[in-house]
Image: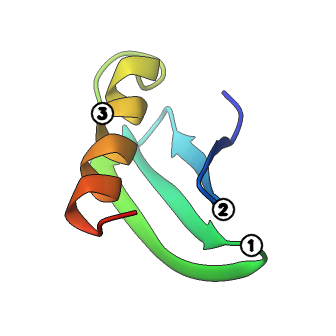
Amino acid sequence: MGAIQYNGYRFVPEYSGIQKKGAIHVYNGDQFIEDIHFDFSGNFPDHDQIEELVNHYCKQNEI
């Protein structure tokens, strides 16, 4: 699962299959902004879940 690029922002997902927790690291250019934390079930997060979190973040922050 690679990074998502949107409007100058980069969203880089990272997760632990053992702990069932993940984070999406948000960057504007090269500057780190914040992490979006999430939980998931299964061996790895669903790509649709990642996209939904990114879309929600963009709408909430008017990106």
Dot 1 crowding, Cα within 10 Å, few <14, some 14–19, many 20+: few
For the question of whether residue 39 can be seen, the reply is no
Residue on which disc 1 sits: 29
Q: Which residue is more in the foreground, 7 or 4? A: 7
Name the image quarter holding residue 30: bottom right
What x and y, as percent, mark residue 34? 47, 77
Dot 3 crowding, Cα within 10 Å, few <14, some 14–19, many 20+: few
Q: Secondary structure at mark 3?
A: helix
Q: Which residue is more in the foreground, 40 or 35? A: 35
Name the image quarter holding residue 3: top right
Dot 2 crowding, Cα within 10 Å, few <14, some 14–19, many 20+: few
Give the distance between the C-alpha atoms of the residues marked 1 and 2, in whole angstroms. Answer: 6 Å
Position of the N terminus, as image quadrant, is: top right
Asked whether, in this view, residue 32 is left or right of residue 44, the answer is: right
Badge nearest the viewer, 1 or 3? 1
The structure residue drawn at horizontal position 52% and vertical position 42%, both measured from the top left corner, is 16
Where is 63 relative to 45, above or below?
below
Residue on which disc 3 sits: 52
Residue type at mark 1: give it.
Gly
Residue on which disc 2 sits: 8
Q: How many callouts does the rendering have? A: 3
Q: Secondary structure at mark 1?
A: loop
Position of the C terminus, as image quadrant, is: bottom left
Where is 31 relative to 17, above or below?
below
Discs 1, 2 touching: Cβ within 8 Å: yes
Residue type at mark 2: give it.
Gly
